[in-house]
Structures are given as C-alpha cells and as structure tokens.
Amino acid sequence: MKKIYLLCFLLLTATFVKVQAQCTPDLSWTHSGIRPDSATGLPHACENLPYTAQFDIYVPDSVHAAIPPSTSPIAIYIDSVVVTSITGVPSPLTYSVNPTSQKFEKFAHGCMQITGTAPAAGVYPLTVVTKSNIRLLFNFVPATVRYDTIRYYKIVVDPTGSSNCMASINEQADPSQLAIMSIAPNPAANALNVKVNVPTAGKLHVSINNLVGQQVYARTVTVATNGYQNLPINDLQFNSGVYLLSIEQGGQTITHKVTIVH
C-alpha cells in the first residue's frame, strides 16, 4: 500500500485552503507514484525567507502490496483516492492543488505546491487522512473503502545563519551586491570560513558582536578582485553562544547569526 499512501499526500482539496495560483502537472511523467518520494522528502526551508516546493503525481491503475495477515504481495486496483483532511502546514505557508477536486481517479496527473514565507526554524510534520476506493485480487470485484493516516513528510525550516540558508539568501540576491554565500561550519568551535561575494575589489571590514551589541572580534581584509572570496576566521577565542557576524564594504553591510560551541 506504500505507493497508494505516497499518492495520497498530494491530493489536497480546496476545502481546506483558499486556492492560490495553480501549479502545472508534468504530463510527460508517467511513473507510478509521486516525486519527490518519501525518501527524498521536501527541500528544506529557511526561516523568514520565501519557500516553494512542488510535487508531481501520477495515479497508477494498480499496485502490488502485502495485506495483513498475508505477507505475499497481491494486486490492488485503484478506483480513486480522496483526501479527507490535512494538518501540519505551518502558517504563513499555504498550499494549493491542481486539480482542485479532492478526488483523483486512476491514470490522473496532478501537482501540489507549498508556498509562502517560512515560519520560525523547526520541524513541522504533515499528517494526511485519506479514504481509498480499491479492489483486491480482481478488477471486477466490488470496491473496498480503506482509511489511512499518512505521516511520511515534514517541512524542515533551518535557522538563519545555517550553511543551507546562506546559499538560499544568496540565490535571491543581486550578484552585484555584497552577499554571504556560506558560513561553515556553523556551529563552529575555534575557526570558521565565510564564503562571500564581493562586488568590487578593496577593503572588507569583518566584525562579530554578541547579542547585547558588544564587539568581540574585528578585522579588515583587502581583496584584490571582485567575485567569490573565502574569508577564514581562525581565532574565535570567546565564550560559547550566539553571535552576529557582519561584513561591510562601501556602505553595504550584511549580518548573519553564527553559533560558537567550545
């Protein structure tokens, strides 16, 4: 039944959400199931940044699965799948589905998008309750109704300052602007490396402050060319905690969180 469960996650209805701009199903994709699959999962989000995730689905005619108490796979024919509820999508994220009907017949294509601004960092499990109309053994046997609860997916929101979120921030930035590409490792012990996009050659002013505004680190670096630069910081000799790393050049300043753990 696993493939049926994976399909069910995508079949979200406008009954539970105000429909936004619809996604476009990929009609060329005819593999049974859903992409990304449950093993791949959803892309991570970054807190307070725009987020979009899309699923494509193709409902097969049948699957093979073991039905307890039997351990041998048997043919399960799919008439339709209906989603009765979905919970766990964190506000202000919303979701929309195409088509807007909650009922999907076999051989139906569909897609679903989760969009919006990501909430605070954390892990947000998604729960979907479905009603499947299936036929066991033979396609002409009357349909059986099966209710299931699916908990295969979750939305992981990474904190500002993590390496994943540095890349996400940079992808949205103007390449001509000062931008942090990554901070690694983060958390750090005694050293870290900052990858930064520098719009012009010249001096970079690097500083680290604690959360009450006290400066604990300061350094000026001269870069000979514009573009991507690696800035190693090797002497993090201050207490464990959360700090604000700032880089300034020509009136532009970018600031991100770093965590120090000794």
Image (tube, rainbow, N blue to C red):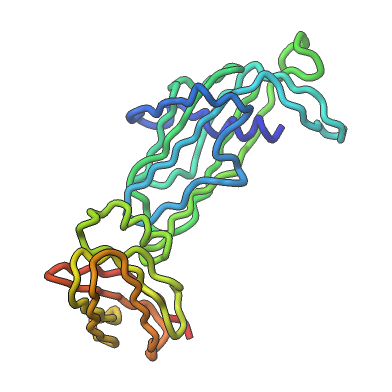
Q: Quadrant of the N terminus?
A: top right
Left or right side of 77 for 254: left
Q: Residue placed at 19% from the left, 71% from the top? A: 201
Q: Residue placed at 52% from the left, 23% from the top? A: 28
Q: Residue furthest bottom?
A: 237
As rendered, which of 5 and 225 lies closer to the eye?
225
As rendered, which of 52 and 234 lies closer to the eye?
234
Kindly indicate the quadrant of the structure image that contains residue 222: bottom left
Q: Residue furthest top?
A: 140
User: Where's residue 206, x and y in %?
Assistant: 25, 79
Left or right side of 30 for 87: left
Q: Residue placed at 36% from the left, 62% from the top? A: 166
Left or right side of 75 for 244: left
Q: Is residue 216 above or below residue 75?
A: below
User: Where's residue 143, x and y in %?
Assistant: 71, 15
Q: Is residue 218 above or below residue 89?
A: below
User: Where's residue 89, x and y in %?
Assistant: 45, 43
Q: Is residue 49 above or below residue 80?
A: below
User: Where's residue 10, x and y in %?
Assistant: 52, 32
